[in-house]
Image (cartoon, helix red, strand yellow):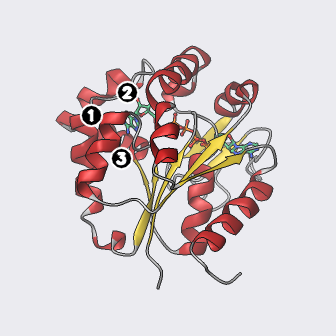
Amino acid sequence: MVNMKLVLLGPPGSGKGTQAKLIVKDFNIPQISTGDLLRAAIKKSTELGLKAKKFMNTGKLVPDDIVLQLLKERLNQDDCIRGFILDGYPRNLSQAQDLKMITNIDFVINIEVNYGLLIERITGRRTCKQCGAIYHIKYSPSKKEGICDKCSGRLFQREDDVEETVKKRIATYEHETKPLIEFYQQQGILERLTSDGTIDEMYQKFSSLLRMKFQLQE
Ligand code: AP5
């Protein structure tokens, strides 16, 4: 059994969550989305979640110590023993240093995307309240409007997916997260993929890249 510790980098709306969910199915490693961990903490109204909410709704990064605490708890769970896909972590250089102290990353995929597509992708996104499946009203609609194909849960629009906040999130990405491309490139573990196709076409690229990198059979 191969061990795969992956990081997906890319701006908001680049398709990190969508591709991570497909990788989970084929490669049998869990997706760890710090955004999802934070939203779960907000839903439970934990002290940490309440602190995080105001940062998320204004498009800013949640303080590093809060996210690190959630991440460490998650990585200690048994399903991470053979690896994981980090979706949304690290998001700045200090988080990348924190991560280095906890574990070694094997491979980083940076998703490059034409910025013109991001706002349309994010504002059209709908997420299942129950199972977290991701849809898009134009590019990946559910069969029945507002209802999840997989579990019949209700679809909702994330609070931070309104255009004004999305623009702030993209600006935060530019200032804080983009320098990580160089950080991982210098370590020789970064590969770039351009998101210029459909979700399925993109997944073919992801899957081939991972199979090649980890020397797995098709
Ligand atoms: P988070 O939840 O991580 O959001 P994000 O990084 O902004 O990324 P998104 O989830 O918006 O986009 P995605 O790349 O996953 O795209 P998706 O696959 O859904 O973070 C939210 C907030 O939490 C942050 O702003 C911050 O405040 C906080 N936070 C999280 N992590 C943190 C950290 N480490 N440190 C500090 N703060 C943190 O796709 C988008 C849409 O496009 C979908 O509708 C999908 O169907 C569609 N789509 C995808 N691919 C394609 C394609 N190829 N063609 C057409 N449509 C497509």
Question: Image quadrant of ligand 1?
Answer: top right
Residue type (three-letter) at the residue carrying disc 3 = Leu
Q: In this view, does 187 lie above or below 2?
A: above
Disc 1 C-beta below 8 A from ligand 1: yes
Determine which of the numbered discs, if any, sits on residue 37 in the image: 3
Location of mark 2 (residue) = 61
Residue 177, percent across and down? 46, 32
**Label 3's element?**
helix
**Mark 2 CB near ligand 1 (8 Å cut):** yes
Q: Mark 1 points at which residue?
A: 64
Mark 2 residue type: Leu
Q: In this view, does 20 lie to the left or right of 5?
A: right
Seen at 54% across and 67% down, the residue is 24
Q: Distance between the residues labelled 2 and 1?
A: 8 Å
**Could you say which is closer to the camera, residue 18 or residue 88?**
88
- Outermost residue, left side: 47
- 10 Å neighbourhood of mark 3: few (<14), some, or many (≥20)? some
Q: Earlier in the sequence, mark 3 or mark 1?
A: 3
Quarter of the rendering occupied by the C terminus: bottom right
Q: How far apart are marks 3 and 1 (CA)?
A: 14 Å
Q: Position of residue 30 (x, y in %)?
A: 44, 65
- Determine whether the residue tagged by mark 1 lies in a helix, strand or loop: helix
Residue 21: percent from the left, percent from the top?
A: 57, 59
Would residue 50 be found to the left or right of residue 106 on screen? left
Residue plotted at (65% across, 72% down): 212
- Disc 1 crowd rating (10 Å Cα; few below 14, some 14-19, many 20+) is some
Question: How far across and how far down the image is residue 12, in percent?
Answer: 57, 33
